[in-house]
Image: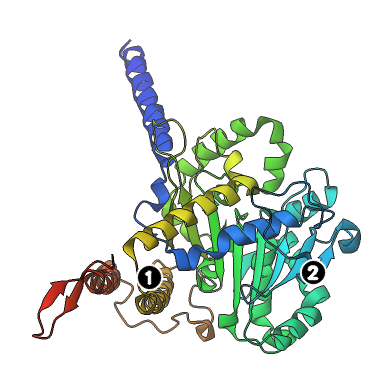
Amino acid sequence: MSILCGVPILECVYCLGCARWLWKKCLYSAGHESENWGLATAEEFAPVPRLCRLILSVYEDDLRNPLWAPPGGYGINPDWVVVKRTYEDTGGCAAPYMIYLDHDNADVVLAIRGLNLAKESDYAVLLDNKLGQTKFDGGYVHNGLLKAAKWVFDTECELLRDLVEMNPDYRLTFAGHSLGAGIVSLIVMYAVQNPDRLGNIERKRIRCFAMAPARCVSLNLAVRYADVINSIVLQDDFLPRTTTVLEDVFKSIFCLPCLLCLMCLKDTCTLEEKMLKDPTRLYAPGRLYHIVERKPFRIGRFPPVVRTAVPVDGRFEHLVLSCNATSDHAIIWLERESQRALDLMLEKDRIMEIPAQQRMQRQESLAREHNEEYEAALRRAVALEIPQAAYSPSYGTFAEVEKGEGSGSSSGARSSLLSFKRMKERWDIFIERLFDVDESGRMVFKKSST
Protein backbone atom coordinates (compact mmCIF):
# COMPACT_ATOMS: atom_id res chain seq x y z
CA MET A 1 0.00 0.00 0.00
CA SER A 2 2.81 2.37 0.90
CA ILE A 3 4.44 1.66 -2.48
CA LEU A 4 1.23 2.57 -4.33
CA CYS A 5 1.05 5.86 -2.43
CA GLY A 6 4.46 6.79 -3.82
CA VAL A 7 3.42 6.41 -7.47
CA PRO A 8 1.69 9.81 -7.68
CA ILE A 9 4.79 11.43 -6.21
CA LEU A 10 6.99 9.81 -8.86
CA GLU A 11 4.58 10.97 -11.56
CA CYS A 12 4.78 14.53 -10.26
CA VAL A 13 8.59 14.42 -10.24
CA TYR A 14 8.58 13.05 -13.80
CA CYS A 15 6.19 15.79 -14.99
CA LEU A 16 8.29 18.48 -13.33
CA GLY A 17 11.41 17.10 -15.01
CA CYS A 18 9.73 17.13 -18.42
CA ALA A 19 8.46 20.68 -17.83
CA ARG A 20 11.95 21.85 -16.88
CA TRP A 21 13.40 20.22 -20.00
CA LEU A 22 10.82 21.91 -22.26
CA TRP A 23 11.42 25.25 -20.55
CA LYS A 24 15.17 25.00 -21.17
CA LYS A 25 14.57 24.15 -24.80
CA CYS A 26 12.32 27.19 -25.21
CA LEU A 27 15.04 29.40 -23.74
CA TYR A 28 17.61 28.01 -26.19
CA SER A 29 15.60 29.55 -29.04
CA ALA A 30 16.66 33.00 -27.81
CA GLY A 31 20.26 32.42 -28.85
CA HIS A 32 21.22 30.90 -25.51
CA GLU A 33 24.38 29.24 -26.85
CA SER A 34 26.00 32.50 -27.92
CA GLU A 35 24.78 34.88 -25.22
CA ASN A 36 28.32 35.31 -23.83
CA TRP A 37 30.07 35.66 -27.19
CA GLY A 38 31.44 38.92 -28.53
CA LEU A 39 29.77 40.99 -31.25
CA ALA A 40 31.04 40.73 -34.80
CA THR A 41 32.22 43.86 -36.63
CA ALA A 42 31.30 45.04 -40.11
CA GLU A 43 34.83 44.45 -41.42
CA GLU A 44 34.93 40.75 -40.56
CA PHE A 45 31.29 40.03 -41.47
CA ALA A 46 31.18 41.98 -44.75
CA PRO A 47 31.96 39.02 -47.09
CA VAL A 48 29.07 36.88 -45.80
CA PRO A 49 26.06 38.39 -47.69
CA ARG A 50 28.12 38.74 -50.86
CA LEU A 51 29.22 35.09 -50.73
CA CYS A 52 25.65 33.97 -49.99
CA ARG A 53 24.55 35.64 -53.22
CA LEU A 54 27.44 34.03 -55.08
CA ILE A 55 26.36 30.60 -53.79
CA LEU A 56 22.78 31.35 -54.88
CA SER A 57 24.02 32.19 -58.36
CA VAL A 58 25.34 28.61 -58.75
CA TYR A 59 21.69 27.49 -58.92
CA GLU A 60 21.14 29.52 -62.11
CA ASP A 61 21.46 27.95 -65.56
CA ASP A 62 22.07 31.30 -67.28
CA LEU A 63 23.65 34.06 -65.19
CA ARG A 64 22.90 36.66 -67.88
CA ASN A 65 19.17 35.89 -67.63
CA PRO A 66 18.71 34.88 -63.98
CA LEU A 67 15.41 33.43 -62.76
CA TRP A 68 15.92 33.34 -58.99
CA ALA A 69 17.94 36.48 -58.28
CA PRO A 70 17.37 38.12 -54.85
CA PRO A 71 16.34 41.80 -54.65
CA GLY A 72 19.22 43.82 -56.05
CA GLY A 73 20.55 40.89 -58.07
CA TYR A 74 23.54 38.66 -57.43
CA GLY A 75 26.04 41.51 -57.72
CA ILE A 76 28.38 39.56 -59.97
CA ASN A 77 29.82 40.04 -63.43
CA PRO A 78 29.14 36.98 -65.65
CA ASP A 79 32.34 37.74 -67.59
CA TRP A 80 34.38 37.05 -64.45
CA VAL A 81 33.06 33.49 -64.09
CA VAL A 82 36.04 31.25 -64.82
CA VAL A 83 34.38 27.83 -64.51
CA LYS A 84 30.85 26.65 -63.74
CA ARG A 85 30.38 22.92 -63.16
CA THR A 86 27.04 21.08 -63.26
CA TYR A 87 26.00 17.62 -62.08
CA GLU A 88 26.96 16.27 -65.50
CA ASP A 89 30.47 17.68 -65.08
CA THR A 90 30.96 16.33 -61.56
CA GLY A 91 29.42 12.93 -62.29
CA GLY A 92 27.77 12.97 -58.88
CA CYS A 93 31.10 13.13 -57.04
CA ALA A 94 30.27 16.60 -55.71
CA ALA A 95 27.56 19.25 -55.85
CA PRO A 96 27.68 21.86 -58.66
CA TYR A 97 30.12 24.70 -58.09
CA MET A 98 31.60 27.79 -59.67
CA ILE A 99 34.99 29.52 -59.69
CA TYR A 100 34.64 33.29 -59.81
CA LEU A 101 37.41 35.89 -60.14
CA ASP A 102 36.11 38.80 -58.08
CA HIS A 103 38.21 41.81 -59.12
CA ASP A 104 36.08 44.22 -57.06
CA ASN A 105 37.00 42.48 -53.80
CA ALA A 106 40.39 40.99 -54.77
CA ASP A 107 39.12 37.44 -54.35
CA VAL A 108 39.44 34.11 -56.13
CA VAL A 109 36.25 32.35 -55.01
CA LEU A 110 35.18 28.72 -55.30
CA ALA A 111 31.46 28.51 -54.36
CA ILE A 112 29.53 25.23 -53.95
CA ARG A 113 25.74 25.00 -53.76
CA GLY A 114 23.77 23.12 -51.11
CA LEU A 115 21.90 19.83 -51.07
CA ASN A 116 19.56 19.05 -53.95
CA LEU A 117 16.66 17.01 -52.57
CA ALA A 118 16.03 15.54 -56.03
CA LYS A 119 19.58 14.19 -56.56
CA GLU A 120 20.52 10.77 -55.21
CA SER A 121 24.20 11.58 -55.63
CA ASP A 122 23.96 14.32 -52.99
CA TYR A 123 22.36 11.90 -50.54
CA ALA A 124 25.10 9.38 -51.31
CA VAL A 125 27.76 11.93 -50.30
CA LEU A 126 25.99 12.80 -47.04
CA LEU A 127 25.19 9.23 -46.04
CA ASP A 128 28.66 7.87 -46.78
CA ASN A 129 29.90 8.06 -43.20
CA LYS A 130 30.10 6.21 -39.92
CA LEU A 131 31.47 7.63 -36.68
CA GLY A 132 35.19 7.02 -36.45
CA GLN A 133 35.43 5.84 -40.06
CA THR A 134 37.89 8.39 -41.49
CA LYS A 135 40.93 9.98 -39.84
CA PHE A 136 42.52 13.20 -41.08
CA ASP A 137 45.35 15.28 -39.60
CA GLY A 138 45.04 13.74 -36.15
CA GLY A 139 41.24 13.92 -35.96
CA TYR A 140 38.12 12.52 -37.57
CA VAL A 141 36.16 13.87 -40.52
CA HIS A 142 33.03 13.00 -42.48
CA ASN A 143 34.03 10.32 -45.00
CA GLY A 144 31.69 11.25 -47.89
CA LEU A 145 32.41 14.98 -47.62
CA LEU A 146 36.16 14.32 -47.57
CA LYS A 147 35.89 12.25 -50.76
CA ALA A 148 33.94 15.06 -52.46
CA ALA A 149 36.44 17.65 -51.22
CA LYS A 150 39.40 15.69 -52.58
CA TRP A 151 37.65 15.26 -55.92
CA VAL A 152 37.00 19.01 -56.29
CA PHE A 153 40.52 19.88 -55.12
CA ASP A 154 42.20 17.40 -57.47
CA THR A 155 40.05 18.62 -60.37
CA GLU A 156 40.55 22.37 -59.88
CA CYS A 157 43.88 22.76 -58.04
CA GLU A 158 45.86 23.59 -61.21
CA LEU A 159 43.34 26.24 -62.26
CA LEU A 160 43.25 27.71 -58.76
CA ARG A 161 47.05 27.76 -58.62
CA ASP A 162 47.23 29.65 -61.92
CA LEU A 163 44.64 32.19 -60.76
CA VAL A 164 46.42 32.74 -57.45
CA GLU A 165 49.79 33.15 -59.16
CA MET A 166 48.37 35.58 -61.75
CA ASN A 167 46.75 37.61 -58.95
CA PRO A 168 49.29 37.62 -56.09
CA ASP A 169 47.36 40.24 -54.10
CA TYR A 170 44.08 38.29 -54.17
CA ARG A 171 42.83 35.97 -51.44
CA LEU A 172 41.66 32.42 -52.11
CA THR A 173 38.16 32.06 -50.68
CA PHE A 174 36.01 28.93 -50.46
CA ALA A 175 32.28 29.27 -49.78
CA GLY A 176 29.43 26.78 -49.60
CA HIS A 177 26.02 26.14 -48.10
CA SER A 178 24.80 23.01 -46.26
CA LEU A 179 26.33 20.09 -48.18
CA GLY A 180 28.63 22.51 -49.97
CA ALA A 181 29.69 24.07 -46.66
CA GLY A 182 31.01 20.73 -45.45
CA ILE A 183 32.83 20.16 -48.73
CA VAL A 184 34.57 23.56 -48.79
CA SER A 185 35.58 23.21 -45.13
CA LEU A 186 37.40 19.98 -45.91
CA ILE A 187 38.84 21.45 -49.14
CA VAL A 188 40.46 24.21 -47.08
CA MET A 189 41.88 21.70 -44.60
CA TYR A 190 43.22 19.63 -47.51
CA ALA A 191 44.66 22.75 -49.17
CA VAL A 192 46.43 23.81 -45.97
CA GLN A 193 47.92 20.31 -45.80
CA ASN A 194 49.10 20.53 -49.43
CA PRO A 195 50.13 24.16 -50.10
CA ASP A 196 52.60 23.11 -52.80
CA ARG A 197 49.71 22.13 -55.06
CA LEU A 198 48.46 25.74 -54.92
CA GLY A 199 51.81 27.37 -55.61
CA ASN A 200 52.89 27.36 -51.93
CA ILE A 201 50.20 29.89 -51.04
CA GLU A 202 50.44 31.30 -47.53
CA ARG A 203 47.93 30.07 -44.97
CA LYS A 204 46.80 33.63 -44.20
CA ARG A 205 45.67 34.09 -47.83
CA ILE A 206 43.25 31.13 -47.57
CA ARG A 207 39.84 31.42 -45.94
CA CYS A 208 36.52 29.61 -45.92
CA PHE A 209 32.94 30.68 -45.21
CA ALA A 210 30.70 27.70 -44.43
CA MET A 211 27.02 28.72 -44.44
CA ALA A 212 24.82 26.48 -42.27
CA PRO A 213 27.36 23.63 -42.30
CA ALA A 214 26.82 20.03 -41.34
CA ARG A 215 28.95 18.62 -38.54
CA CYS A 216 31.95 17.34 -40.44
CA VAL A 217 35.10 17.50 -38.25
CA SER A 218 36.10 16.38 -34.74
CA LEU A 219 36.48 18.98 -32.00
CA ASN A 220 40.29 19.21 -32.14
CA LEU A 221 40.17 19.96 -35.89
CA ALA A 222 37.26 22.39 -35.49
CA VAL A 223 39.34 24.51 -33.12
CA ARG A 224 42.70 24.06 -34.87
CA TYR A 225 41.41 25.38 -38.21
CA ALA A 226 39.44 28.27 -36.71
CA ASP A 227 41.90 30.76 -38.21
CA VAL A 228 40.90 29.83 -41.77
CA ILE A 229 37.33 28.46 -41.48
CA ASN A 230 34.28 30.54 -40.52
CA SER A 231 30.88 28.91 -39.96
CA ILE A 232 27.73 31.06 -40.15
CA VAL A 233 24.59 29.82 -38.39
CA LEU A 234 21.18 31.52 -38.48
CA GLN A 235 19.45 31.35 -35.06
CA ASP A 236 17.84 27.88 -34.66
CA ASP A 237 19.24 26.08 -37.74
CA PHE A 238 19.01 22.34 -37.05
CA LEU A 239 21.88 20.99 -39.19
CA PRO A 240 24.90 22.40 -37.27
CA ARG A 241 23.28 20.96 -34.13
CA THR A 242 22.44 17.54 -35.59
CA THR A 243 24.64 14.96 -33.86
CA THR A 244 22.78 11.89 -35.07
CA VAL A 245 23.77 9.97 -38.17
CA LEU A 246 22.56 11.97 -41.17
CA GLU A 247 21.04 8.81 -42.63
CA ASP A 248 18.47 8.80 -39.82
CA VAL A 249 17.61 12.44 -40.53
CA PHE A 250 16.77 11.86 -44.18
CA LYS A 251 15.00 8.57 -43.53
CA SER A 252 12.75 10.54 -41.16
CA ILE A 253 12.42 13.67 -43.31
CA PHE A 254 8.62 13.41 -43.25
CA CYS A 255 8.58 13.13 -39.46
CA LEU A 256 11.48 15.44 -38.73
CA PRO A 257 9.83 17.07 -35.65
CA CYS A 258 9.51 13.63 -34.02
CA LEU A 259 13.16 12.89 -34.72
CA LEU A 260 14.26 16.29 -33.38
CA CYS A 261 12.36 15.69 -30.12
CA LEU A 262 14.02 12.29 -29.63
CA MET A 263 17.44 13.78 -30.36
CA CYS A 264 16.78 16.59 -27.88
CA LEU A 265 16.04 14.01 -25.19
CA LYS A 266 19.20 12.09 -26.03
CA ASP A 267 21.42 15.19 -26.01
CA THR A 268 19.91 16.42 -22.76
CA CYS A 269 20.68 13.12 -21.00
CA THR A 270 24.28 12.97 -22.29
CA LEU A 271 26.92 14.49 -20.02
CA GLU A 272 28.88 17.32 -21.65
CA GLU A 273 32.18 15.90 -20.38
CA LYS A 274 31.43 12.62 -22.15
CA MET A 275 30.60 14.46 -25.39
CA LEU A 276 33.81 16.52 -25.31
CA LYS A 277 36.02 13.48 -24.76
CA ASP A 278 34.47 11.47 -27.59
CA PRO A 279 37.15 11.72 -30.35
CA THR A 280 34.74 10.58 -33.09
CA ARG A 281 32.00 13.14 -32.34
CA LEU A 282 31.76 15.67 -35.18
CA TYR A 283 31.20 19.43 -34.90
CA ALA A 284 30.61 22.49 -37.05
CA PRO A 285 34.08 23.67 -38.15
CA GLY A 286 36.11 26.77 -37.29
CA ARG A 287 35.10 30.13 -35.87
CA LEU A 288 31.35 30.44 -35.37
CA TYR A 289 29.13 33.40 -36.29
CA HIS A 290 25.63 33.19 -34.82
CA ILE A 291 22.93 35.46 -36.29
CA VAL A 292 20.24 36.03 -33.63
CA GLU A 293 17.02 37.70 -34.70
CA ARG A 294 14.23 36.32 -32.50
CA LYS A 295 13.49 36.53 -28.79
CA PRO A 296 11.48 34.16 -26.59
CA PHE A 297 7.76 34.82 -26.25
CA ARG A 298 7.95 37.53 -28.93
CA ILE A 299 6.30 37.51 -32.36
CA GLY A 300 8.20 38.39 -35.52
CA ARG A 301 11.84 39.06 -36.30
CA PHE A 302 13.93 41.69 -34.55
CA PRO A 303 16.98 43.55 -35.87
CA PRO A 304 19.59 40.79 -36.23
CA VAL A 305 22.66 40.68 -34.02
CA VAL A 306 25.78 38.73 -35.01
CA ARG A 307 27.85 37.13 -32.26
CA THR A 308 31.16 35.37 -32.80
CA ALA A 309 33.60 33.18 -30.90
CA VAL A 310 35.87 30.15 -31.12
CA PRO A 311 34.14 28.02 -28.48
CA VAL A 312 35.41 24.67 -27.30
CA ASP A 313 32.63 23.62 -24.96
CA GLY A 314 29.09 24.82 -25.67
CA ARG A 315 29.58 24.51 -29.44
CA PHE A 316 25.92 24.20 -30.54
CA GLU A 317 25.53 21.03 -28.50
CA HIS A 318 21.73 21.02 -28.20
CA LEU A 319 18.99 20.93 -30.78
CA VAL A 320 16.35 23.62 -30.53
CA LEU A 321 12.63 22.92 -30.37
CA SER A 322 11.58 25.66 -32.77
CA CYS A 323 9.23 25.97 -35.71
CA ASN A 324 12.09 27.80 -37.48
CA ALA A 325 14.65 24.99 -37.07
CA THR A 326 14.36 24.02 -40.76
CA SER A 327 13.55 27.41 -42.34
CA ASP A 328 16.64 28.96 -40.70
CA HIS A 329 18.71 26.52 -42.75
CA ALA A 330 17.61 28.05 -46.09
CA ILE A 331 20.29 30.01 -47.95
CA ILE A 332 17.66 32.60 -48.97
CA TRP A 333 16.92 33.51 -45.34
CA LEU A 334 20.60 33.40 -44.49
CA GLU A 335 21.42 35.87 -47.25
CA ARG A 336 18.55 38.18 -46.30
CA GLU A 337 19.28 38.28 -42.57
CA SER A 338 23.05 38.53 -42.97
CA GLN A 339 22.57 41.53 -45.27
CA ARG A 340 20.22 43.14 -42.72
CA ALA A 341 22.78 42.56 -39.99
CA LEU A 342 25.59 44.04 -42.09
CA ASP A 343 23.50 47.10 -42.99
CA LEU A 344 22.88 47.73 -39.28
CA MET A 345 26.60 47.44 -38.52
CA LEU A 346 27.50 49.87 -41.32
CA GLU A 347 24.80 52.31 -40.22
CA LYS A 348 26.15 52.23 -36.68
CA ASP A 349 29.67 52.91 -37.95
CA ARG A 350 28.39 55.78 -40.09
CA ILE A 351 26.63 57.38 -37.15
CA MET A 352 29.79 57.10 -35.05
CA GLU A 353 31.77 58.76 -37.90
CA ILE A 354 34.89 56.65 -37.48
CA PRO A 355 37.86 58.29 -39.28
CA ALA A 356 39.80 56.24 -41.83
CA GLN A 357 42.92 56.03 -39.66
CA GLN A 358 41.00 54.77 -36.65
CA ARG A 359 39.14 52.33 -38.88
CA MET A 360 42.50 50.84 -39.92
CA GLN A 361 43.58 50.69 -36.28
CA ARG A 362 40.36 48.88 -35.46
CA GLN A 363 41.06 46.29 -38.16
CA GLU A 364 44.52 45.69 -36.70
CA SER A 365 43.03 45.43 -33.23
CA LEU A 366 40.42 42.97 -34.52
CA ALA A 367 43.15 40.78 -36.04
CA ARG A 368 44.99 40.73 -32.70
CA GLU A 369 41.78 39.86 -30.84
CA HIS A 370 41.02 36.99 -33.21
CA ASN A 371 44.54 35.66 -32.84
CA GLU A 372 44.36 35.83 -29.04
CA GLU A 373 40.94 34.19 -29.02
CA TYR A 374 42.20 31.45 -31.36
CA GLU A 375 45.20 30.73 -29.12
CA ALA A 376 43.00 30.76 -26.00
CA ALA A 377 40.67 28.21 -27.62
CA LEU A 378 43.61 25.95 -28.43
CA ARG A 379 44.84 26.17 -24.85
CA ARG A 380 41.38 25.48 -23.49
CA ALA A 381 41.09 22.40 -25.69
CA VAL A 382 44.26 21.09 -24.04
CA ALA A 383 43.01 22.06 -20.57
CA LEU A 384 39.75 20.16 -21.12
CA GLU A 385 41.77 17.12 -22.27
CA ILE A 386 40.16 17.03 -25.70
CA PRO A 387 41.53 13.93 -27.50
CA GLN A 388 44.50 14.80 -29.73
CA ALA A 389 44.06 18.53 -29.14
CA ALA A 390 47.85 18.95 -29.06
CA TYR A 391 48.51 16.68 -32.01
CA SER A 392 50.48 19.01 -34.32
CA PRO A 393 52.53 21.86 -32.81
CA SER A 394 53.27 23.20 -36.32
CA TYR A 395 49.66 24.43 -36.57
CA GLY A 396 49.76 26.51 -33.43
CA THR A 397 48.57 23.88 -30.97
CA PHE A 398 50.17 23.66 -27.59
CA ALA A 399 51.84 20.29 -27.25
CA GLU A 400 54.06 21.49 -24.43
CA VAL A 401 51.80 22.82 -21.74
CA GLU A 402 53.41 24.05 -18.58
CA LYS A 403 52.67 22.17 -15.42
CA GLY A 404 49.45 23.41 -13.86
CA GLU A 405 48.36 25.28 -16.98
CA GLY A 406 45.46 22.90 -17.49
CA SER A 407 43.89 23.76 -14.15
CA GLY A 408 40.62 25.63 -14.00
CA SER A 409 42.15 28.56 -12.14
CA SER A 410 44.86 29.16 -14.74
CA SER A 411 42.34 28.80 -17.55
CA GLY A 412 40.15 31.39 -15.87
CA ALA A 413 43.13 33.67 -15.38
CA ARG A 414 44.02 33.51 -19.08
CA SER A 415 40.41 34.17 -20.02
CA SER A 416 40.28 37.17 -17.69
CA LEU A 417 43.56 38.49 -19.11
CA LEU A 418 42.25 38.27 -22.68
CA SER A 419 39.00 39.94 -21.67
CA PHE A 420 40.94 42.75 -19.98
CA LYS A 421 43.05 43.31 -23.09
CA ARG A 422 39.96 43.51 -25.28
CA MET A 423 38.23 45.90 -22.89
CA LYS A 424 41.31 48.14 -22.76
CA GLU A 425 41.64 48.29 -26.54
CA ARG A 426 37.94 49.03 -27.02
CA TRP A 427 38.04 51.68 -24.29
CA ASP A 428 41.02 53.38 -25.96
CA ILE A 429 39.16 53.43 -29.28
CA PHE A 430 36.07 54.85 -27.57
CA ILE A 431 38.09 57.63 -25.92
CA GLU A 432 39.76 58.55 -29.23
CA ARG A 433 36.36 58.94 -30.88
CA LEU A 434 35.05 61.35 -28.26
CA PHE A 435 38.08 63.39 -27.15
CA ASP A 436 40.97 65.44 -28.53
CA VAL A 437 44.08 66.70 -26.74
CA ASP A 438 44.39 70.50 -26.74
CA GLU A 439 47.61 72.56 -26.75
CA SER A 440 47.91 72.37 -22.98
CA GLY A 441 47.74 68.56 -23.07
CA ARG A 442 44.25 68.30 -21.58
CA MET A 443 41.51 66.12 -23.05
CA VAL A 444 38.53 68.00 -24.50
CA PHE A 445 35.41 66.87 -26.35
CA LYS A 446 35.73 66.76 -30.12
CA LYS A 447 33.87 69.43 -32.01
CA SER A 448 31.16 68.18 -34.39
CA SER A 449 32.15 68.23 -38.05
CA THR A 450 28.89 70.02 -38.80
Name, please, the residue furthest toward the top.
1
Residue toward you, 108 or 399: 108
- Residue sitting at x 39%, y 62%: 350
- List x then y, in percent, for residue 68: 74, 46
Identify the secondary structure beneath mark 2. Answer: helix
According to the image, label 1 marks what residue?
Answer: 383
Q: Is residue 10 left or right of residue 176?
A: left
Q: Quadrant of the N terminus?
A: top left
- Sequence-first disc among 2 and 1: 2
Task: Name the colouring of the figure.
Answer: rainbow
The secondary element bearing badge 1 is classed as helix
Residue 177 % position (x, y): 66, 55
Alpha carbon separation for disc pair 2 and 1:
51 Å
Numbered circle sitting on residue 441: none
Q: Amino acid at mark 1?
A: Ala
Figure quadrant of the C terminus: bottom left
Q: Which mark is residue 79?
A: 2
Q: Residues within 10 Å of mark 1 (few under 14, many from 20)?
A: some
Q: Residue at x 12, y 86 (%)?
A: 439
Q: How many numbered discs, if any? A: 2
Q: Dividing the picture into quarters, in which one does residue 448 lie?
A: bottom left
Q: Amino acid at mark 2?
A: Asp
Q: Is residue 280 at all visible to an observer of this figure?
A: no
Residue 365: where, in percent of width, then height? 36, 77
In the picture, residue 358 is in which quadrant? bottom left
Quarter of the image where one finds residue 436: bottom left
